[in-house]
Amino acid sequence: MENRCVFCLWILLLISVVVIEVQGGDGSVGCDEEERRALLRLRDAFNGTTALSSWGDGKETDCCMWERVKCDLSNHHVTQLSLADIRLNTDNPIFLNTSLLFLPFRELQNLSLGSNNIRGFHEVLNLSKLQVLDLSFNLYDEIPSLGLLRSLSILNMEGNSINTWSHFEELTTLKHLELLNFAYNDLSGKIPQSLGSLTSLKFLSFMSNWQISGSLKDGGLCKLRKLEELDLSKNGFQGEIPSCLGNMTSLRVIILKQNYLTGTLPSAAFSTLTSLTHLSLSLNYFEGSFSFNSFGNNSKLEIFELDNLSSNLTIDTESPHYWMPQPQIKIFRLTNCKLNEPDRNLPSFLLKQSELRVLELRNTGVREIFPTWLLINNSNMEFLSLAGNFLTGHFTYNNHSQSKNEYLILLDVSMNQIQGVLPYSIGVFSPYLVLLNMSMNAIQGGIPPSMGELKQLQLLDLSNNNLSGELPKEFVQGCIFLEFLKLENNNLQGQVLPTNSNLNSLEYLRMENNCFSGELSRGLLNSRWLGLLDLSNNLITGEIPDWIGNLSRLSSIILSNNFLQGPIPMSFCKVKELSFLDLSKNKLTETIPACLDVSSLRYLHLHDNGFTGFLPKILSEASSLVTLDMRDNNLSGTLPTWISSLSNLRFLLLGGNQFQGSIPSQLCDLRNVSMLDLSSNHLSSVLPSCLHKLQFGSKPTFNDMLEPKVYNWNTLWGLRTYLYESQLQINIILELDYGASDEEEEVKFVTKSRSESYKGNILKYMSGMDLSFNNFTGSIPYEIGYLSDIHTLNLSNNHFAGSIPTTFSNLKQVECLDLSHNKLNGQIPQDLIELNFLAIFSVAFNNLSGRIPDKKQFLTFDNSSYEGNPLLCGHLLEKSCSNSSTELSSEPIIQNNDDPFKETFLWSFIASYTIAFIASIVVFLCCTDYSERLLEYVRAKFIVFSF
Ligand SMILES: *[C@@H]1O[C@H](CO)[C@@H](O)[C@H](O)[C@H]1NC(C)=O
Ligand SMILES: *[C@@H]1O[C@H](CO)[C@@H](O)[C@H](O)[C@H]1NC(C)=O
Ligand SMILES: *[C@@H]1O[C@H](CO)[C@@H](O)[C@H](O)[C@H]1NC(C)=O
Ligand SMILES: *[C@@H]1O[C@H](CO)[C@@H](O)[C@H](O)[C@H]1NC(C)=O
Ligand SMILES: *[C@@H]1O[C@H](CO)[C@@H](O)[C@H](O)[C@H]1NC(C)=O
């Protein structure tokens, strides 16, 4: 029995060997000769590729056996060519000769040419049996002519550079087309009406062309009754979601995110789409109210995303019945809306879920006790964000429950009203957290040692709470991947980072506004990638240690408002990319080391210290400097003429020192200066008339808009984006199986939305000049009146003589004008009533005479603006002006025809630091009544921190 079997096998083997021999020996049995030659031509067309090197020249080879080739075994014709990604090491684009290369394959059904840098076809592709054509990720800049491919059912053009709709019309003859993918191209304008005739379509994507616009009704979209998956995300579609969508009852997947869609969500349409599993509507501008009841009880929804950009959306999941998705929902994201008014409860369907992987309910107004059960019920949760709600109560893991959240990588419960202490066993229950944000709550107590178990943690934000105690050693030794640590605005104590700490990956450390004390410890040195260090407003004592220079990556050092003393150590010179240095409000002495690398320095805040000597000469090389603030030190000498080399300077603040001599005319070269404070020095002599060349208010350049680089936000965004977007993207792609993730694009968008949100908060750019409390003499140059964009002008407490220049009536933006305590005489120009924004005005203690202006703004000032001028008269002063010689001064206003100063000066700041800084300067400079504008600043600051 056994022997016979072995014999049979032998025979079989023999026969098959003979068959192979015969086939190999005679090509005609193997594959079609014409096709074989065409294949060789194809190999040559992709010349040099190793991927096809096994395709032989010799007659003996059967081309059906070649790699990447499949034949129909019954007739030996080639049916499939898988030629994707075979031009590996060559970039130059090619054109393919269609008739020469493909015409012979009359039975070809499946042709894949993706990722080959193909620029186009010569001639029309004519393969009547072709069903699948994949030209993705090539360099087509127009749609190839495909009208002859009568059997085509799948066309993939994703990732080319197609920028015109020409030849699109031809596709309408393809009655079997089921999948059409134009994702990641450069198409723009409206989708042609002819789309509607592709009535067999099941899958359609125009994702990420960015420029396709018009309404969703265009292109006869609603005629595509068989459509199952539709992705039009990342384009410029406008208008409402049309109700005709409700007729496309096969739809399973609808992705419309990142367009400009508006209006209400069409309840009726969604109620008929009973097959829907994935609905993504994020990053549009929907309004009105929407009830999940429209999805009915038979909803198959597994993914729902609505991260809305308008704030006028009301969502209800509870009435008239509560909504219950039938299978378990996996991804649910809802942000920026009013959820379940007026009770503001969490959606009750959440109680029944156990397979949630992503849950985001951000800025939805939910008012509940912190739902720890969400984490207990859903052990597969990867991403939980409940930020920006009104969650109260404590956040504790249930120590008795067995469940761990092994998959949780992001937990964001920031901006709520959570009380109590941090979950003691957080490191045990969520051991793989990458991002933890619990900022802006009312959390008390210390940081639990188990935090040190979070070995994957990259970003920890516990800022703006009531945390106290010292940083536990388990934490500072355990979290070795921590890159961003934000602990500011708490009551934490002890050493900043104790000597044994080991936060090796730290790049960004913010601990300002705490009670950290003692000298800076060497623990910081283990964080050698540190780029930003903010320890301001603590109780740190001693000298700035010399080793700090070994943290040579530092670009921002902020140590203001501590008790630091002694000189700035020489080792600062080792820091090569210093761009932000704030050591203000300490007790530092001597001066800036002459070897400091100032080439990247943009912001220098050294005010309120004991620095002495001349203005440091090294600063003459700081050509990027925007802010130079050395107010309230003991600097002396004259203002240097090299100051003119600081051509980007915007804030020059040297008030409260011992400078003497005159203002050098070189200072007038600092055209970008908008705040100049030289007050409370010993400066003397006459003012240079060229001061009017300073701009005092102008639009920012684009570079200024990018100021937050200083704070390394970019990296932060990157990380955030990675976690918030691509993580989801990946999940979604799995469900969709076409399309690709695009981290880069997401970054682009996030950046864009950032700048848009700033646009909404345009701040008036403040500008001012304070020369008060010096010994200036002579008359006030009339050219000062040309500073038509200046907001604040303080010349008080000097020895100015002569009259108030009539040109001052050109200071159209001035809000605060202080000329008090001088020796001015003559009359107050009546044209000053044109200064419509004037809020604070003083000419007290001069020798002015005549009638005081008594119209418009001037009606709001009182006696104190004028006291100490016995010769002034007017109703307000209860002194009538009987003498006619006190009438209007007739001195003509000097005309200023090509006025270079009349620029608009509305612009928006991004760096909150700068904003807060300016706000403080404005108050300092002169005026006190800025509450409204300050509020605006604070709001802007808030936005920056909450991005
Ligand atoms: C393509 O090949 C055919 C057949 O060899 C030839 O006649 C034609 O000129 C070629 N076309 C181009 C554009 O090279
Ligand atoms: C849905 O289809 C029906 C029947 O073809 C049609 O009468 C109706 O107008 C369509 N509804 C919408 C909203 O287009
Ligand atoms: C959906 O289910 C809820 C709860 O079971 C029920 O009260 C409601 O009547 C159902 N709604 C519909 C439209 O069937
Ligand atoms: C989820 O937790 C809540 C509260 O503990 C509980 O009532 C509910 O039954 C749980 N649901 C599931 C699906 O486990
Ligand atoms: C943490 O959340 C707050 C408020 O939602 C936000 O402002 C802050 O930027 C977040 N922190 C990080 C590091 O993302």
Image (cartoon, rainbow, N blue to C red):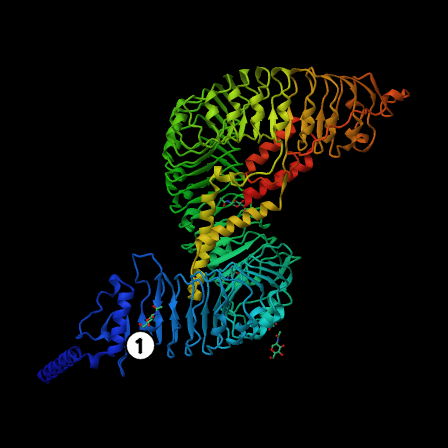
Asked whether the viewer can see residue 382, the reply is: no
Q: Position of residue 483 (x, y in %)?
A: 42, 42
184 on left or right of 774? left
558 on left or right of 128? right
Residue at image coords 82%, 31% = 859
Front residue of 311/194: it is 194
Judge whether 134 appears above or below 587 on screen. below
538 on left or right of 433? right
Q: Quadrant of ligand 2?
A: bottom right
- Helix or strand or loop: what does disc 1 sit on? loop
Judge whether 136 appears above or below 629 on screen. below
Identify the amino acid type marked 1: Pro
Q: Which residue is mark 1?
A: 104
The residue at label 1 has a CB less than 8 Å from ligand 1: no
Front residue of 553/406: it is 553
Front residue of 922/586: it is 922
